[in-house]
Image (cartoon, grey):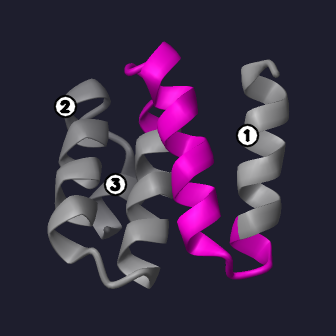
Amino acid sequence: MDNESLFKRAIQHMDSKNYARAIDYFKVILSEDKNNDDVWVLLGLCQTKADEFDKAYMSFNNALKINSKNSFAWSG
């Protein structure tokens, strides 16, 4: 499955509030492309919803390391 398909699946799981599955998909995408700041932000949002606050903090920080102007990462 390509990253675009994985991303669509992850978003579907986010929309249905199945954050654990969305996290799994985002991690697979990041295993192939660690420099995608938007995926790091979405991962952080899912981790926040799953009460994984320490992991979410790290995800938002990773996004900011890639793109310090990512406003969504700053809001996380």
Residue matched to label 3: 73
Disc 2 marks which amino acid?
Answer: Lys
| Left or right of residue 73, residue 4 in this image | right
Circles 2 and 3 in contact, beta carbons < 8 Å: no
Would you say residue 25 sits in the magenta stretch?
Answer: yes
Label 1 sits on what residue type?
Answer: Phe
Residue at (32%, 84%) from the top-left corner?
Answer: 51
Gap between marks 3 and 1, in whole Å? 18 Å
Q: Residue sitting at 54 percent across and 32 percent down? A: 28
| Number of the label disc, if any, that sits on residue 7 | 1
**Element marked by disc 1:** helix
Q: Amino acid at mark 3?
A: Ala
User: In the rendered image of this protein, does residue 49 appear above or below residue 3?
Assistant: below
Q: Position of residue 64 (x, y in %)?
A: 24, 40
**Disc on the earlier residue, 3 or 1:** 1
70 relative to 31, above or below: below
Question: Callout 3 environment at 10 Å: few (<14), some (14 to 19), or many (20+)?
Answer: many
Write down the residue under mark 2. 65
User: Does label 2 or label 3 sit earlier along the sequence?
Assistant: 2
Decide which of 76, 9 is in the foreground and name it: 9
Contact, mark 2 vs mark 1 (Cβ under 8 Å): no
Q: Are marks 3 and 1 in contact (CB under 8 Å)?
A: no
